[in-house]
Amino acid sequence: MSETLSSRIHDEERQGKAYAPVVEDLRAHRKKFYIESYGCQMNFADSEIVASILNEKGFGATGNYQEADLVLLNTCSIREKAEQTVRHRLQMFRQVKENKPGMLIGVLGCMAERLKGKFLEEEKLVDIVVGPDAYRTLPGLIEEAESGQRAVNVLLSREETYADISPIRLDSNGVTAFVSIMRGCNNMCSFCVVPFTRGRERSRDAASIVRECEDLFKRGYKEVTLLGQNVDSYYYVDEGKDEIVTFARLLEKVALIAPSLRVRFSTSHPKDITDEVLYIMAKYENICKYIHLPVQSGSTRILQLMNRTYTREWYIARVGRIREILPDCGISSDIIAGFCTETEEDHQETLALMQHARYDMSYMFFYSERPGTLAARRYADDVAEDVKKRRLDEIVKLQNSLSLESNRQDIGKIFTVLIEGDSKKSAADWRGRNSQNKVVVFPKEGNLQKGDYAQVKVEDCTGATLIGKVI
């Protein structure tokens, strides 16, 4: 009935997880495309934009890459493992293409710009390379590739937000959906490639975000997650209405669509999350009481090397403010073990901060140097891999105990749970999440259906799952 915590312990970018679309009615389409996505939720949302662009040009989705005319991998550069996985998949697709000469293979997303030369020329694995800001040009690039040319567009943009494109929801459960509210990032964290692969930060116009959320609600969706690399820095000037829309104001606009539409968001930067956002969360019941607040390290010295622009004390104060305004708020984090020059004392500070913050769950991984980042240029990756792995193991074990303790405290409580579908373990049980983003599993009873809200009393738990019963 329960999920293992290990299935949730990975970095936020969900490395190595493939994502293939459900099959649409292909009779209406002349050609078929297949897409896999790796990485963060932004990549998965981008794949839905790509699907919409291709659909307009007569392509229909298929879940079988062997029958596809166009195979696309939406890639991530956050960790080396993801790049190895993508290269392996490209080699597999290339073998299929040998028996299907008309097939085109393309790489999208964050790896596109950095590895375009290797993919196109050295290894000849792909026909098309498209960066995150160039998806509108994909139809033209496909035509180029069909004529035998290698087609490339990895130009970054200061304006592109794809605000006018209605995403096609791929592999959707029909209950929850991601809505991108901004693109790029202005934070130059020294370990991160995002500013180089996704460009500078720009916010999508608020009206288009609200319209997309309204449309999802009309189509039966019950939850939207507002996505951005740093949602708290969202800022849009609506000149037509002479209105400045901050993230707090945007949250309120979406919450007001309907009381039965749940609203989540990700990701928050500790330096930018404001009391105004916390008070808006407290004001509206349908804004979920959950914040993903990456800390990365508990050491101020390491945070400075990471260019995180806050101290250990600042982060602790932010957690305290969340607990003060939203006592029932769930908090999760990202943690990196073994960053450049990290000492045992730095590591112990991270463990101590975890104990203080009492995270419900965390995405944890050891440092992997990424070419082109500030850290790669400035610092030596000087912590031995066995030390990194040992420190990560200690972080994971501590988080396991914190997660179990947090879940045990929920035994006897009653939560409103949005049913997302069958439990992964048994079709006799429902699986959903509460406001705090905890997975809740409970037996199917009465006339409840997927997409309904259920009042569930927690009777037991594991480190990853609350187990309850409908009351």
Image (cartoon, rainbow, N blue to C red):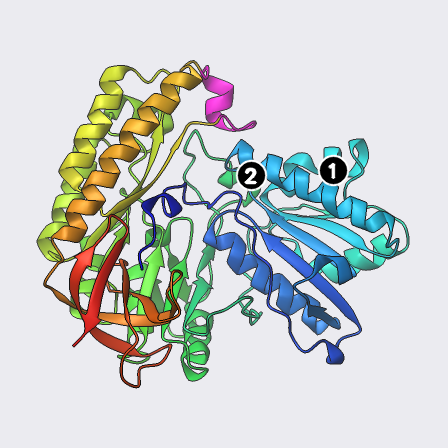
In the shown orientation, is residue 421 left or right of residue 118? left
Q: Quadrant of residue 302?
A: top left
Looking at the image, which residue is at 65% across and 57% down?
35
- Tell me the quarter of the image containing the N terminus: bottom left
- Tell me the quarter of the image containing the C terminus: bottom left
Give the amino acid at mark 1.
Answer: Phe
Q: How many circles with numbers are drawn on the protein?
A: 2
Q: How much space separates mark 1 and mark 2, taking CA atoms?
A: 15 Å
Vertical placement of residue 34 versus 393, above or below = below
Vertical placement of residue 152 versus 214, above or below = above
Label 2 sits on residue: 82
The answer to whether the residues at label 1 and label 2 have Cβ atoms under 8 Å apart is no
Front residue of this view, candidates 378 and 145? 145
In the shown orientation, is residue 172 left or right of residue 264? right
**Residue 192 visible:** yes
Looking at the image, which residue is at 27% across and 77% down?
453
Magenta highlight range: 369-381
* Marks 1 and 2, the one that precedes in the sequence: 2
